[in-house]
Image: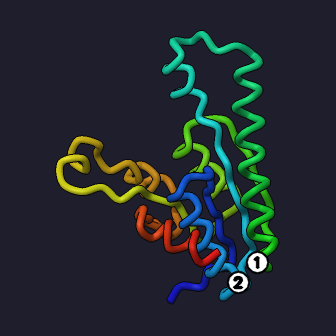
Amino acid sequence: MASYKKILLCYDGSREGRKALRCGADLALDLQAETHLLSVVDMRSTIAQSAGLLTDVACGRFEETAREILQEGVDWLTERGVRAQGHFAFGHPIDEIANLANELNADLVVVGHRCRTGLSRWWMGAGNTPLLDRVSCSILVACSSAAEDKKQQAAA
């Protein structure tokens, strides 16, 4: 098994992000790895959805929410004994994950993924493929299901 000394966890507060956080925390503890947590605000999709009519107040609220999510992730890791440095970025998530992974010289990137089946996978395409081509480290894709999430919440 590869030795992962520096791990980048990607967290957005979603069910899939929580799964990535759990998996990454377990690895970081087991391997005593240096841990970084990234939260990204993707303003491109937000601006497109609003037809470019976002106010400065709305943009500020998106940033505030993303920073709260980042702090939530850092706090969750700290409670479990993982010291993590938080990172915040504006941009397309794939770009920002790749940029930070390369800047940190990370050994492993942990991302969450919503498992899809059948035609939805064909229609949506392979969303993580561009990331695979842009980093020189390993990537752990943590898949989550609604049933698994309910089980985790019941155990907490």
Q: Mark 2 and mark 1 in contact? Answer it, CB < 8 Å.
A: yes
The residue to which callout 1 is attached is 80
State whether residue 153 is above or below residue 37: below
Res. 29 mark: 2
Residue 90 seen in render: yes
Dot 2 or dot 1, earlier in sequence: 2
Q: Nearer the viewer, residue 14 or 36?
A: 14
Q: Position of residue 83 (x, y in %)?
A: 81, 72
The image position of residue 81, as x and y in percent, is 80, 79
Mark 2 crowd level (few <14, some 14–19, many ≥20, 10 Å Cα): some
In the rendered image, which quarter is residue 22 located in?
Answer: bottom right
* Amino acid type of the residue that numbered disc 1 sits on in the rendered structure: Arg
Above or below, comparing residue 3 to residue 65 in the picture: below
Q: Nearer the viewer, residue 124 or 72?
A: 72
Q: State the image coordinates of residue 85 (x, y, percent, origin top left).
A: 80, 62
Query: Disc 2 marks which amino acid?
Result: Leu
Identify the residue at image location x=66%, y=64%: 105
- Display coloring: rainbow
Residue visible at 51% across and 28% down in the picture: 45
Could you tell me which secondary element the residue under label 2 belongs to? Answer: helix
Residue toward you, 114 or 97 = 114
The reply, left or right, for residue 145 in relation to residue 71 is left
Q: Secondary structure at mark 1?
A: loop
**Percent position of residue 73, x then y:** 72, 60
Mark pair 2, 1: CA separation: 9 Å
Residue at the limit of the structure toward the front, as seen here: 154
Question: Residue sitting at 56 percent across and 66 percent down?
Answer: 20
Any mark on residue 14, and which? none
